[in-house]
Image: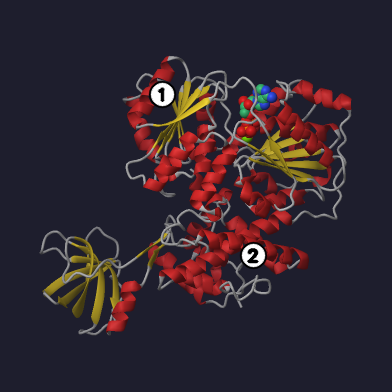
Amino acid sequence: MTSLLAPLSGLKGIGPEREKCLAAADIHQLLELLLVTPVGYARTPELVPRPVAGLCAFTAVLERVRTGRMRGRRGGFLELTLRSEEGRLRARWYGRGGSNLSWPPGTELLLTGRGASAAEEPFVIERCQVVGSDEELARALQTLHPRWPTIPGLAAGTLRGLIHQALQLDLPDPLAAWIGAEMLPLGLAFRRVHEPVLETEADAGMERLLFDRFVALLVALGTGGAAALAPEIRVSQKIAARIDARLPFALTAGQRTVLDEILSDMQVTRPMRRVLQGDVGSGKTAVAVAAALATVAAGRSVIFLAPTQELAEQHHQLLVRWLKGSRVKLALKTGGSAARARELAEADIITATHAVLRAKLDGKRLGLVVIDEQQRFGVRNRLAAVKMGVAVHALSVSATPIPRTLMLTLLGDLPRSQLAGMPPGRAGLTTRLANVEEALAAVREAAARGERSFVVFPAITAAGVPALVREGVRWQRRELAGIPVAMVHGAQTAEERQSGLESFRTGQTLVLLATVLVEVGLDVPEATQMVILGAERHGLATLHQLRGRVGRGAKAGTCHIVPGAGAKPEALQRMETLVRERDGFRLADADLAQRGPGEVLGVRQAGHGGVLRVARVREDRLLDLARSTAAKVLAAGDADARDYLMALQSAVSPEFRPQDAL
Ligand code: ADP
Ligand code: MG
């Protein structure tokens, strides 16, 4: 049996070059390769008697094959001469130049591809299947054809070949002992997802994968190390007063309540595993900082984790401002900024991205790990954070409101603090549907008043250049001429991004053209306009997060939701819900009703939508089953199952696939 965690070098045809491409996409082991699941499945189009212009399928008999080469194009093609019901025709199969077709003349084929508009042009074959009998034809017509995501540098056929090889291996099912016959065995599930014949098969396979992700999430949440002893963090009145004095504002009653809950957990040696929840902009950072300061006052250090470098820098700067003149030692550790080992060892509060988890740190003094925007972290990183110290308190800060009905299932018995209300002095926020012209006009008017605006462009493919770069430059010249504009996107270096953000933060630039990179945590209270282009591409949670970037200050904010031309009715419905509903939790409930738990929790990778629709009712049941399975795995301390689940979770965690988020 081959381990799911075995390196890819065991597969045929993996050289250093391909290994590098795969590694760049964070695919190192069999499991990660198998998790590159299709983004969609194509069906064979309706049969036509002979090719028509555009995508079509027809049957024909093979007469002759010859190999052709094209100038200036890599690889050759096969040229097929075919006889259809209505005469003879030529067809080309590109990318097959070197291969030998073993089909003899007279073989009956089903051809799918693109017909040319001019009669003398050849038909371009995308797929070619042998259909000797009516049954074979019927089956071929029903067969689904997966489309896998593109991995830069790797031909689609190569990826398909590697996945096919992996599927032939004897793959273990690490959860076999804990689940009944109700679920497909893992190896079979992967085969069904990657090489289904029927839609129902792909669904069943995906259901198993979805189930495993639920279990992974639950196992990670339940891994608390109950026996470990965490430091007691006691807060005297004097210290409490000193902490208050460090904050630039008085905490609201809501903030005070949740802070008290957190501090009372940290007073005892049982490691805290509290989740702090609150709507966007409710002031969770100040609460987390207060908890951090209490820890430092007790002689312990803190790691303050943020999912992006930008957010880590923002938190670090905030700490620098709030703690000016104090003796608290601060350090910043992100992938881009390497604090020196000594600095890290001496720091009281390390603000960091997950890069810190790979740094060699002495965890002995560690008292608290704050995981801001914890929904953005993979479980492996969350666990690594908790394991850094022998035992530490952990505060997970979750900005995405979890639907009430899912909270129990998901968080189980984890204590949570719900931050109620909003900080005072907010002028508020209006959300409206708008077209591009209206939104741009609002941005221009705001700029004329000296106010700042965000314009968020939809992310496009992982490999492509963000639309922002092309469109944004054009806008800068025309629609936004004369207005100082900054641009921030994933194709930039961290320094470029940082300086773009900085110019917007300080007001040097009044418009920030950005990708969804700005979704999490960014705090620029002076911004009043948020324009979200291609809004149909985002879920409600993201849209809500994005609009939460404005209306944070003394001036009222407006969020302009701009749907793209191809927005589907259900996407428009989602946007209308957003216009209507301000409260993040009620919104989350609506989101759940519209999309189902798999999507809402983000355990389903984008694109699994396609033809796959695990029925919602079924998904709820899946959650129940996942809960009991997770409990069994935990109780048994099954190390194999746990390793698998951790690998599974980190293989899909956003920070390992940053390109998805940009
Ligand atoms: P989130 O909960 O989304 O992380 P933040 O912690 O970033 O929100 O807070 C949003 C804004 O509210 C920040 O600009 C912060 O300075 C401000 N803020 C937080 N608490 C208070 C308070 N008690 N009084 C006034 N302003 C506050
Ligand atoms: Mg925040």
Q: Within the displayed image, which quadrant is ligand 1 positioned in?
A: top right
Q: Residue at x 73, y 27 (%)?
A: 253
Q: Position of residue 329 (x, y in %)?
A: 77, 30
Q: Is residue 547 left or right of residue 419?
A: left
Q: Nearer the viewer, residue 289 or 364?
A: 289
Q: CA distance from mark 1 to mark 2?
A: 49 Å
Q: Residues within 10 Å of mark 2 (few under 14, many from 20)?
A: some
Q: Nearer the viewer, residue 561 or 512?
A: 561
Q: Position of residue 30 (x, y in %)?
A: 56, 67
Q: Is residue 315 above or below residue 270?
A: above
Q: Is residue 181 visible?
A: yes
- Name the kind of residue labelled 2 in the image: Leu
Q: Is residue 476 above or below residue 397?
A: above
Q: Is residue 601 left or right of residue 12?
A: right
Q: Secondary structure at mark 2?
A: helix
Query: Which picture quadrant has residue 549?
Result: top right
- Mark 1 or 2 closer to N-term? 1
Check residue 625 in the rendering and tell me which mark sits there, or answer none: 2
Q: Is residue 326 above or below residue 122?
A: above
Q: Residues within 10 Å of mark 1 (few under 14, many from 20)?
A: many
Q: Is residue 377 visible?
A: no
Q: The N terminus appears in which quarter of the rendering? A: bottom right
Q: Residue at x 83, y 45 (%)?
A: 364
- Name the kind of residue labelled 1 in the image: Val
Check residue 443 in the rendering and tell me which mark sits there, or answer none: 1
